[in-house]
Image (cartoon, rainbow, N blue to C red):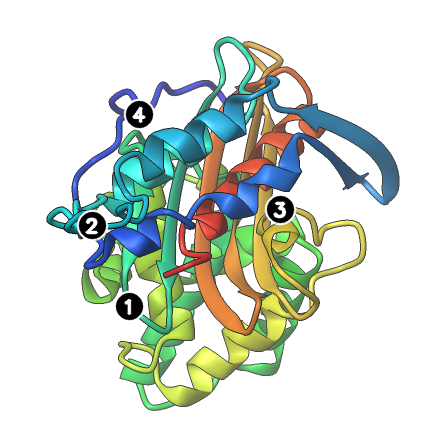
């Protein structure tokens, strides 16, 4: 479909915020324990397929043991040692490391707990966006409309709805032209705080390059209260992302309960036959809300890519289970 363009540096965990209490570290990965055999219903072009994704025996338990080492309560007559700290990014790396990844495939994850404001990122490589860039395109259009003091036209609203809900490519192309293609996207992203996203060449919006960390910034613009997008613009994006067409509501939604808001992207690369599978959005789990972005490439099939993305999303949310 699109010519191949390699993306970015290899994935590696970075360092961010430590937990304040070791007791938290002892439970953060328990949410992954039930994922030894995960069955995911993936909808591909309107037809469902059952995808099996099984972690290696003991891998999840080992991740928990490693993350919680040294956090047990002292025995009688013993003094509690100084509480060790656990880096959220390290915990995320361990949790994602328990998710099966095909040889040659890559995955990068970013997650934010909206209640605590704490976040974690695994991997800093750049990936082709495929259709998740449609959220960025609409955000850019809304910023431009705000700047001129107008709402979206009837035609723009029609394109926006089809582009987000149905992932309609013709509508995306029309709005990509309306914002000024890559140059217009870059102008909007400077305002929105996306410093690691580069628009695709000419009409190739699907080959925009981005990082999981940048997608988390964009999600905060859409779902947070402090944003360059005004209340009406945020409501527009939230509403459309919360009404994704049946068959396209896989991805990060697997990590939460009903009521997720998301946008997915999928793209087979013509040069390799391998799949780009991405998912970004807001999920609710156990009364808490999370913003999650998962990017992947090098998947041999769409179904295996979906399984990887959903497993990584579950792992990301599990890191904050006891926080």
Cα gap from disc 1 to disc 2, whole angstroms: 38 Å
What residue is shown with label 1?
A: 117
Of 6 and 201, nearer the camera is 6
| Mark closer to the chain start, 4 or 3 | 4
What residue is shown with label 4?
A: 11
Residue 145 is at least partly visible in this image: yes
Residue 210 is at least partly visible in this image: no
| Mark closer to the chain start, 2 or 3 | 2
Helix, strand or loop at label 1? It is loop
Q: Quadrant of the C terminus?
A: bottom left
Q: Are marks 4 and 1 in contact (CB under 8 Å)?
A: no
Residue drawn at x 20%, y 50% as measured from the top left: 77
Question: Going by the picture, which residue comes out furthest to the front?
Answer: 77
What residue is shown with label 3?
A: 251
Q: Residue 131, located in which quarter of the rendered image?
A: top right
Question: Badge 4: few (under 14), some or many (20 or more) residues near its Cα, within 10 Å?
Answer: some
């Amino acid at each position: 479909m699109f010519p191949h363009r390699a993306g970015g540096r290899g994935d590696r965990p970075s360092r961010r915020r430590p937990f304040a209490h070791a007791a938290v570290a002892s439970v953060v990965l328990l949410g992954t324990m039930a994922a030894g055999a995960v069955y995911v219903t993936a909808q591909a072009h309107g037809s469902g397929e059952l995808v099996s994704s099984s972690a290696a025996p003991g891998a999840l338990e080992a991740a928990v043991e490693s993350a919680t080492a040294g956090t047990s309560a002292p025995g009688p007559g013993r003094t509690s040692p100084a509480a060790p700290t656990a880096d959220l990014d390290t915990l995320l790396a361990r949790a994602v490391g328990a998710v099966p990844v095909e040889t040659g495939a890559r995955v990068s994850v970013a997650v934010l707990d909206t209640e605590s404001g704490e976040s974690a990122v695994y991997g800093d490589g750049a990936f082709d966006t495929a259709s998740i860039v449609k959220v960025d395109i609409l955000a850019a259009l809304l910023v431009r409309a705000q700047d001129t003091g107008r709402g979206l036209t009837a035609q723009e609203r029609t394109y926006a709805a089809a582009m987000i809900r149905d992932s309609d490519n013709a509508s995306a192309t029309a709005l990509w032209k309306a914002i000024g293609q890559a140059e217009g996207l870059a102008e909007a992203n400077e305002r929105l705080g996306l410093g690691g996203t580069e628009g695709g060449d000419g009409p190739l919006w699907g080959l925009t390059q981005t990082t999981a960390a940048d997608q988390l910034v964009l999600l905060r613009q859409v779902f947070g209260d402090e944003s360059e997008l005004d209340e009406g613009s945020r409501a527009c994006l939230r509403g459309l992302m919360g009404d994704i067409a049946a068959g396209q509501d896989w991805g990060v939604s697997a990590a939460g309960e009903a009521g997720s808001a998301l946008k997915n992207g999928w793209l087979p690369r013509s040069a390799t036959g391998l799949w780009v599978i991405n998912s970004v959005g807001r999920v609710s789990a156990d009364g808490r809300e999370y913003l999650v972005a998962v990017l992947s490439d090098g998947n041999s099939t769409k179904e295996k890519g979906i399984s990887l993305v959903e497993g990584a999303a579950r792992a990301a949310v599990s890191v904050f289970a006891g926080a």
